[in-house]
Amino acid sequence: MKARVLVCDDKENFTKLFRRILPADRYDVTTAEDGARALALVAAGDFDVIVTDIRMPNADGLAVLREARSRDTDVEVILMTAYATVPAAVDAIREGAYDYLAKPFEPDEALLVVDRALERRRLRQQARDLRRALEDIHRIDNLIARSPAMAAVVALVQRAAASDATVLVTGESGTGKEVVARAIHNTGERKAARFVAVNCGAIPENLLESELFGHVKGSFTGATAEHRGLFEEARGGTIFLDEIAELPLAMQVKLNRVLQERKVRRIGATDELAVDTRVIAATNVDLKARVAAGQFREDLYYRINVLHIALPPLRDRREDVPALAAFLLERHGARRETMPEGFTEEALSALVKYPWPGNVRELENTIERALAVTDGPRIELEALPSEVASVLRPRATHGTEMHLSYREVVDLARDRASREYLITLMRELGGNVTEAARRAGMERESMHRLLKRYGVRSEDFKAR
């Protein structure tokens, strides 16, 4: 969809200039010859960017700015001004103008300012859309659900939270099984009590019984004091047994009895203690297959599988990725002094298209990494790991190069080298485009075009 640009100037040569320099495949240009016509078009139209001279007959550029901003706070306004009215342009920026062009200006400079203004408008709209997405989605606690698959999960979580049934959460590693468990706990009647998470595969087998059920002093070598088990610690609340398939068979027998009797016996004790503890178990393996192989007790399987919540992998719910990315950006970006407002369209597209073998956990790590290497107002494709970015810009390997023509391989190598050269140049010269052009032996306008072509922003390399 083309961007709509309004150019207002009583001098025809300037309106013709913008019609010439703004690419017709990307911009739809409308012109106004005076302030009154500009105000009428602003009132009737819907423009993405407005370029207006400050001094015009019937109404000046400041009036156009105020009218435009009153109708659409996202519209970007660029002022054109002669040297004598630069102070007025600076004042206009305080009123919300994006930038100004001091006449006479280079055509490439004007194109660059319009491109950046449009970019900022789209970024602001994207940030607002992502915030709205977070408001509109089905959401419980930290569960993000826009896809039908996750909406069904949210419905089950709500049902689980309203009951006290034992829950089994299944899904691939990184799909958010603990997030689901916490959502059930935090929205249920037990939310005031503790949520205790246990990784059954991380506790040595000889310590499992003591950790889960406790022991009395002197019950075994090293038991120098009484120890409360995690079931007691979670009394009145919820115990989350992650990786339950890793429990040894002997411990499965004891856990099954605890679930049946709602009582635990500490190691070395003669009496049992009643524990009012809700149990949520999770696994990333096929428990039915484990039962069939004799590796998991059938009675325990049916005991924990009262209410089953199966989490879909992230690749099967791509509709959730933009909202998840926005949520994770907000969560991890809040710890920074300055936080990017969002993602470029290219970066967001890569996030949606990538298959996420590590699921939400991998997405979260990706967002944290991108934040660590981003200084600008948005996260760009280059801030993403190579495997994520490659879904849009495949990196040729020895194997894939064999399927490309000689010209394609040469073009690919040239593009890589050009971009790396520009990044090195900008980094060394602190984003000074004029000096970079001199060093490269080209005109400043040509350097601007190269930077734009390869997605290198000079402002990202300037001292802050």
Image (cartoon, rainbow, N blue to C red):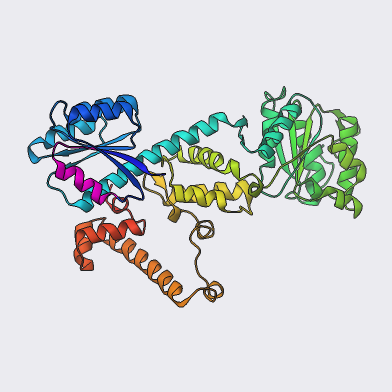
In the image shown, does 176 or 126 lie closer to the viewer? 126
| Residue visible at 75% across and 36% down in the picture | 230
Q: Is residue 342 left or right of residue 323?
A: left
Q: Quadrant of residue 254?
A: top right
Q: Is residue 329 left or right of residue 228?
A: left
| Residue visible at 26% across and 49% down in the picture | 111
| Residue visible at 79% across and 45% down in the picture | 244
One can see residue 337 in this view: no
The kind of secondary structure the magenta stretch mainly shows is: helix
Residue 164, x across and y down, in percent: 79, 26
In the image shown, does 54 or 202 lie closer to the viewer? 54
Segment colored magenta = 7-22
Q: Quadrant of residue 319?
A: top right
Residue 10 part of the magenta-drawn span: yes
Which quarter of the rendered picture does the N terminus lie within? Answer: top left
Task: Farthest residue to the left: give it.
Answer: 84
Indicate whether 374 appears above or below 302. below
Residue 127, x across and y down, in percent: 44, 37
Residue 171, x across and y down, in percent: 73, 46
Indicate whether 93 appears above or below 436. above
Indicate whether 449 appears above or below 413. above
In the image shown, does 210 or 87 lie closer to the viewer? 87
One can see residue 362 in this view: yes
Residue 7, x across and y down, in percent: 23, 39
Residue 239 part of the magenta-drawn span: no
| Residue visible at 89% across and 39% down in the picture | 302
In the image shown, does 172 or 227 lie closer to the viewer? 172
Q: Is residue 70 left or right of residue 324?
A: left
